[in-house]
Image: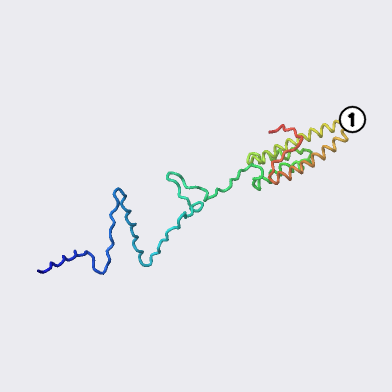
Amino acid sequence: MSETPPPPPPPSSSSGDEPTTPVTPPAEGAAPPPPPPPSEPPAAPGEPVAEAPAPGFAPPPPAYGEQPPVYGEQPPAYAQPAAPQQWAGQPGMMTPDEKTWGGAAHWSALVASLVGLAFLGPLIVLLVKGNESPYVRAQAVESLNFQITMAIAGLVSFVLLFVLIGFVLLPLVGIWWLVFTIIGSVKSSGGEMYRYPATIRMVS
């Protein structure tokens, strides 16, 4: 009586040289594993490879003046600074011609005093250049008021000569007039809006 040979083993799907890895089925109710990340295509020859930023690194903000304008808004104007404005007639911002005539409104009284009419100098400046510059007009009016005030003070001092006090007042009035007329000439020639002290301002 002959023995029956055992059945051959089932064929394997893999080659005999590669070991097979057993596949463990997922547990019931567990989430499927995430898909693998897509691989980036290789860079072309000669093309720079972009480096990934380090974790926690943020790109620097754009430089000042390079921010793109928001839609519907005008671009900022700080790139073109505005030129400083100049206003004629403002103290310290006069043209050379205004400074010259502003000083002439005062020292012309010294010249006109040679004929005994000191107020005639600023009056001429007021009539000739007063309508061309607010600064020259203001200085001519100020000088004219001062010369009229000094003329009144001189006349009163002359009358008081009869009671002897005029001999003291008249020289004081003359010194006051000379000193402040020179100061007014210097100040206004430098572009300063000069005003005389103790002046009756009858002309405006």
Colour logic: rainbow
Q: Tag 1: Cα neighbours inside 10 Å, few (<14), some, or many (≥20)? A: few
Kind of residue indicated by mark 1: Val
Q: Does 111 sit left or right of 162 as displayed?
A: left
- Please name whichever residue, 76 or 42, is drawn nearer the observer in this view of the structure: 42
Quadrant in which the C terminus appears = top right
- Residue 199 location in percent, x, y? 75, 34
- Please name whichever residue, 34 or 12, is drawn nearer the observer in this view of the structure: 12
Q: Does 168 sit left or right of 95 as displayed?
A: right
Q: Residue furthest right?
A: 164
- Residue 165 location in percent, x, y? 88, 32
User: In terms of secondary structure, where does tag 1 sit?
Assistant: helix
Image quadrant where residue 179 sits: top right
**Which residue is tagged 1?**
163
Q: Does 22 sit left or right of 93 as displayed?
A: left
Image quadrant where residue 172 sits: top right
- The residue shown at (55%, 49%) is 81
Relative to 177, is 63 above or below?
Answer: below
- Residue 109 location in percent, x, y? 75, 41
